[in-house]
Amino acid sequence: MGIYAVDKLIAETRRIAKEYRLATGKTLPVTPEIAINDAISILELQPNDERSPGYDAIYEKNGEHLKVQIKGRAIFNDKKQGHRIGQLKTEQVWDAIILVIMNADFMPEEIYMAKRDVILDELEEKKKSNKKGAMTLAKFKLISELLWTEQNGFE
């Protein structure tokens, strides 16, 4: 490991991303890395140290071991509708998707999880109008389980 702790680097990344957005109106593409770090830290996941494609970490609960993709979405305007999560790579090996929703300061506010079969069923229903495997934030929340909130901790 380098001379900087990962937590300090992520904190600095949050600060820079926020300042960059305020200065330019654009977002730096750092949300996924922040989300992965936050989900692993908050949910005490086992990171995919082998760098096997398709998943970012292992979620262990009640004897279940799920390979999870971790997605992140920063919300800058609560009034805006139609927020989407990133493309879901359905051809890769994973058991569930964890979504970290962040505020405008790139701080986690909520974490959700949906299992693969539920996600694939939803994508199959919308296949004709949705060629890229994308899903709205509202739909993901509907089909997933809320795991954690900033206000209440574990749900």
Image: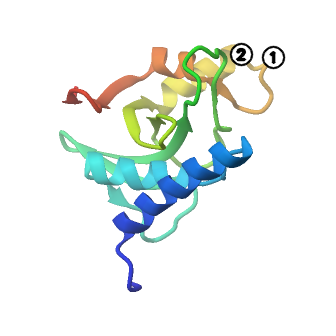
- Quadrant where the C terminus sits is top left
Q: Quadrant of residue 77?
A: top right
Residue in view at x 38 percent, y 78 percent: 4
Query: Looking at the image, do the residues carrying marks 2 and 1 touch, with CB atoms under 8 Å apart?
Result: yes
Can you give x and y, in whole percent of width and height, for residue 15 in the image? Answer: 49, 54
Please give the residue where the numbered disc 2 appears in the rendered image. 126
- Quadrant where the N terminus sits is bottom left
Please give the residue where the numbered disc 1 appears in the rendered image. 129
Spot the residue most to the front: 23
Kind of residue sitting beneath label 2: Lys
Can you give x and y, in whole percent of width and height, for residue 85 in the image? Answer: 61, 32
> Is residue 141 placed above or below 106 in the rendered structure?
above
Residue in view at x 64 percent, y 16 percent: 80
What is the crowding at mark 2: few (fewer than 14 residues within 10 Å), some, or many (at least 20)?
A: some
What is the crowding at mark 1: few (fewer than 14 residues within 10 Å), some, or many (at least 20)?
A: few
Between the C-alphas of marks 2 and 1, the distance is: 6 Å
> Is residue 60 placed above or below 138 in the rendered structure?
below
Spot the residue most to the left: 62
Q: Which mark is residue 58?
A: none
Can you give x and y, in whole percent of width and height, for residue 132 in the image? Answer: 77, 33
Residue in view at x 73 percent, y 47 percent: 24
> Is residue 34 placed above or below 125 in the rendered structure?
below
Task: Work out whether residue 127 or residue 13 is closer to the camera in this orientation and state it.
Answer: 13
Identify the element where label 1 is drawn.
Answer: loop
Q: Quadrant of residue 139?
A: top right
Residue in view at x 67 percent, y 20 percent: 124
Task: Work out whether residue 120 or residue 153 is closer to the camera in this orientation and state it.
Answer: 153
> Is residue 113 placed above or below 23 in the rendered structure?
above
Can you give x and y, in whole percent of width and height, for residue 16 in the image? Answer: 55, 57
